Amino acid sequence: MLFKGNNFIFFSGPILGIILSLFIWGCIPYYFFFFDLYMGLCLFMCIVAINIYPLLMRGWSSNSKYSLVGGLRGVAQSVSYEVRLILLLLILFILVSCLSFLEVLRYQYYIFILFFYIFSGFIFFVSLLAELNRTPFDFSEGESELVSGFNIEYGRVGFTLIFIGEYSIIIFFSLFYCLLFCFFYLVITIVLLHII
């Protein structure tokens, strides 16, 4: 099946996916290393929006109808929940009146965002589950059809790159949610100040 597909796109899909999943980590502010992006929200939105292209490339380039349908389902699901995710983030950043993630973290020194943003925080969490294709929203893998979805034609290195990229984004969004809505940043800061 590989010889009937487009080889360049077939091999560049997982590589682009892992590059984007590692590039998105640049949005996290590193307070102790004096690194902050002033427009970190714009970089985050651009990377999340571009992240559907490797999924589409992996599904289309295999020249298999099962992987194409799985890729299209994944793209449709990602785009539909991505809109809600971005709108909730924009509401949060309008509340803080800055596009920097570090300013959101500094804002939480005075009042925790989760206290008056609890329903939107829950909706944001559900949107993250859908964006990451986790358990109630894992339609793109299509396990009930006995196929894996967009990655059915991949093996060895391509399969490994796909899932390293996918789990890197899962870890990033877990940290991202904790930084924005939980007390994680304040607890880490207090612990580090007491150690020093």
Image (tube, rainbow, N blue to C red):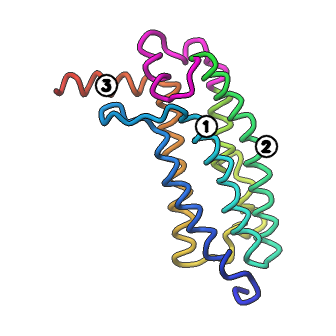
Region in magenta? 97-121
Magenta stretch contains residue 119: yes
Q: Earlier in the sequence, mark 3 or mark 1?
A: 1
In the rendered image, the vertical position of residue 183 relative to residue 22, given as above or below: above
- SS category of the residue bearing label 1: helix
Q: Which residue is mark 1?
A: 42
In the image, which disc is placed on residue 126? Answer: none
- SS category of the residue bearing label 3: helix
Amino acid at circle 1: Cys
Q: Which residue is mark 2?
A: 80
Residue at 31% in and 25% down:
189
- Tell me how far mark 3 sits from mark 1, CA to CA: 26 Å
Amino acid at circle 3: Thr
Amino acid at circle 2: Ser
Q: Which residue is mark 3?
A: 189
In the rendered image, the vertical position of residue 79 relative to residue 6, given as above or below: above
Crowd rating for badge 3 (residues with CA inside 10 Å; few <14, some 14–19, many 20+)? few
Q: Quadrant of residue 149?
A: bottom right
